[in-house]
Image: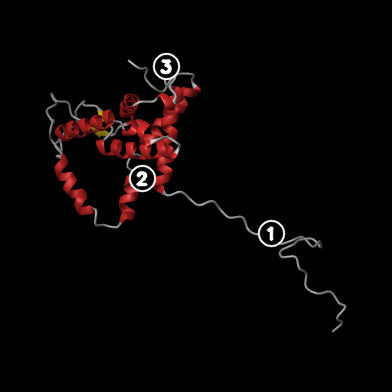
Amino acid sequence: MDPSGPGPSPVVGGGGGGDAPAVAPQQRPAQLSRYESQKRRDWNTFLQYLRNHRPPLTLARCSGAHVIEFLRYLDQFGKTKVHAAGCAYYGQPAPPGPCPCPLRQAWGSLDALIGRLRAAYEESGGTPESNPFAARAVRIYLREVRDSQAKARGIPYEKKKRKRAQQAAEPSSSSSAAAAGGSGSISRAAAATAAAHQAGGSSAAPSNT
């Protein structure tokens, strides 16, 4: 064998005859968990709400009262029937027929949403002391929603609380997925409405009263 003959090319996967160095494959960014993705969508939805707010509202000036206003705004996207006190089905967990009572956001969805927004606020540089999602007024509002929906729907909160304690021993994968997706429709519906209002030059949020 002629030692002066051509040897193997040092180029890996090269298409030309140059001595180009091998290129390492690019690393894909780590995929966000379902919870983190939902938290990001919720945060973007809230920021969009602030941008469309009338009068204009910045995150630094946002208070617990504004958070409660945001939660009430989300009720228009709710899918949970909450019977009024005068409804014939008030307090019945399985009403036999339809009624004109409004649809609302379920307490569990709002509670999970506030938990994600509280975390997102501090991850974005906010301090726990100034976190509007951790305000006492927000906790009181959620408690009132929980109690009123429990009475209207005939579903005692204490039973659900005991059921949660039993499920705490189960694998965390299913519980984390449920927490992340519990109010996914909230952000998607609210974000779509906010974008439509912004495109039309109007506000997606009601004005302060």
Is 78 left, or right, of 43 in this rendering?
left
Query: Which dot marks residue 162?
Result: none
Check disc 2 and give the amino acid type: Ala
User: Looking at the image, is mark 1 or mark 2 earlier in the sequence?
Assistant: 1
In the displayed structure, 10 sits above or below 32; it is below
Query: Which dot marks residue 55?
Result: 3
Residue matched to label 2: 180
Tell me whether the residue at label 1 lies in contact with that at label 3, contact meaning CB atoms closer than 8 angstroms: no
Residue 179 x, y percent position in the rendering: 32, 45
Residue matched to label 1: 23
In the displayed structure, 39 sits above or below 28; it is above
* Marks 1 and 2, how far apart at CA: 38 Å
Residue 126 x, y percent position in the rendering: 42, 34
Q: Residue at x 42, y 32 (%)?
A: 45
Question: Toward which corner of the image does residue 209 lie, by quadrant?
Answer: top left
Q: Residue at x 39, y 22 (%)?
A: 205
Question: Toward which corner of the image does residue 124 lie, by quadrant?
Answer: top left
Secondary structure, mark 3, is loop
Circle 1 Cα neighbour tier, 10 Å, few/some/many (<14 / 14–19 / ≥20):
few
Check disc 1 and give the amino acid type: Val
Circle 3 Cα neighbour tier, 10 Å, few/some/many (<14 / 14–19 / ≥20):
few
Check disc 3 and give the amino acid type: Pro
Q: Nearer the viewer, residue 107 or 56?
A: 56
Q: Residue at x 19, y 33 (%)?
A: 149
Is 7 left, or right, of 54 in this rendering?
right
In the displayed structure, 40 sits above or below 52; it is below
Kindly give the residue lying farthest to the top in the view shown: 209
Tell me whether the residue at label 1 lies in contact with that at label 2, contact meaning CB atoms closer than 8 angstroms: no
Secondary structure, mark 2, is helix
Tell me whether the residue at label 3 lies in contact with that at label 2, contact meaning CB atoms closer than 8 angstroms: no
